[in-house]
Image: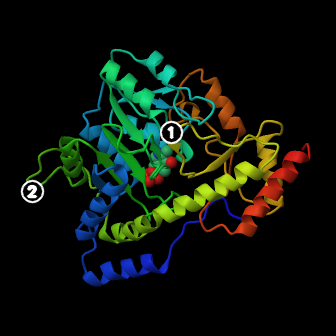
Amino acid sequence: MIPAARPEIGEEERAAVDRVMRSGMLAQGPEVAAFETEFAEIVAGRESVAVNSGTSALHMAFLAGGVGAGDEVIVPSFSFAATANAVALAGAKPVFVDIEPKHFSIDPAAVEAAITRRTKAVMPVHLYGHPADLVTLAEIADKHGLQLYEDAAQAHAASVNGMPVGAWGLAASFSFYPTKNMTSGEGGMITTGSSELARAARVLRNQGMERRYANEVVGFNTRMTDIHAAIGREQLKKLAGWTARRQANAAYFDQHLEGVIVPPTAEGAVHVYHQYTIRVVDHDRDRFAEELAKRGVGSGVYYPTPIHRLPSFAEKADLPVTEEAAAQVLSLPVYPSMTDAERDAVVEAVNAVAGAGA
Ligand SMILES: *Cc1c(COP(=O)(O)O)cnc(C)c1O
């Protein structure tokens, strides 16, 4: 069976963990500091603050940016629940809007239509590794005096017009969950151009204190450990090579898949293919996935239920493009260690199922 995703853990990561274990310093320390400095290189030098998950990164970024009770934050409903959870955990209200159909990203026109006097921020998600329309969203945020946050959990090293994601908004959040483009086991990173926001995030992740036992605010323990940071540092060295391999796999699929809609890349955008997501329009998507599994090809549906319809939010919203995407998307294996033979097997299986009129 070719799995939908496969984390890449090498000898370097094992040795790095061993190095930290031998040092006896396990919690946040020099490895975290080094990881932050090194990660800044893929976000145009922005200050980076490491935390224990991508969800914590989103949550701490909102709190550090002053998002809270009474505020509205405009988000897409077509994302992982953590996108909206973080808004709600900060005490604000997520306002769900529709996506555009090509890249599954928040629709800038829908954002503009949803702005009220309470709107504090907008947060696009760079879903599947394709950047949202950051040029237009930055213009809208600017025009209406809104904060722009980026959920970059799936888009390490993606870019628009040569500027990396994570360097556009007031702040951005990355995830290092094992299935993401790089991992630290669990972990997350806030990136920002605001030294004030960075300082606030550093204080919040550490019980609200900068100086020990001089707590300034009520804070959290959302620190990253040195063990996780050491893994992340090794993964970061490999990210560029892995991204190139994901892109090569995607280009191969673009060229050889038939009978399904392959994912286009916007002009000026660099897609890093966290997922290679097709649309299945002429078949029942779930049956299509079952048929692929019978042929030894794993796949995934991200996400079958839009966030606004989850029991945790249960909101009424009319988001037709989101609903259609949730019914049609199917993500194929695109991970870097996939062999050429596995890649061909994916193409063969998809084309056979698409052609079978199931
Ligand atoms: C993975 C993910 C998150 C949450 O990251 P964790 O590290 O799992 O907490 C948030 N948003 C999106 C879009 C994600 O894919």
Tell whether circle 2 marks a residue whose Cβ is less than 8 angstroms from ligand 1.
no
Q: Measured from the top left, where is residue 163 in percent x and y?
A: 39, 43
Task: Say what amino acid the circle numbered 1 marks.
Answer: Gly
Which dot marks residue 211?
2
Q: In this rendering, which labeled residue sits more in front, label 1 or label 2?
A: 1
Vertical placement of residue 5 versus 192, above or below: below
Vertical placement of residue 228 versus 196, above or below: below
Horizontal arrangement in the rendering, residue 203 relative to residue 226 (left or right): left
Q: Visible in this render: residue 85? A: yes
The residue located at (51%, 41%) in the rendering is 269
Q: Give the secondary structure at mark 1.
A: loop
Give the residue pinned by disc 1: 268
Vertical placement of residue 82 versus 148, above or below: below
Q: Give the secondary structure at mark 2.
A: loop
Which dot marks residue 303?
none
Image color mode: rainbow
Residue 260 lies in quadrant: top right
Horizontal arrangement in the rendering, residue 252 relative to residue 267 (left or right): right
Horizontal arrangement in the rendering, residue 189 relative to residue 283 (left or right): left
Q: Quadrant of the C terminus?
A: top right
Task: Say what amino acid the circle numbered 2 marks.
Answer: Arg
Q: How far apart are marks 1 and 2 (CA)?
A: 44 Å
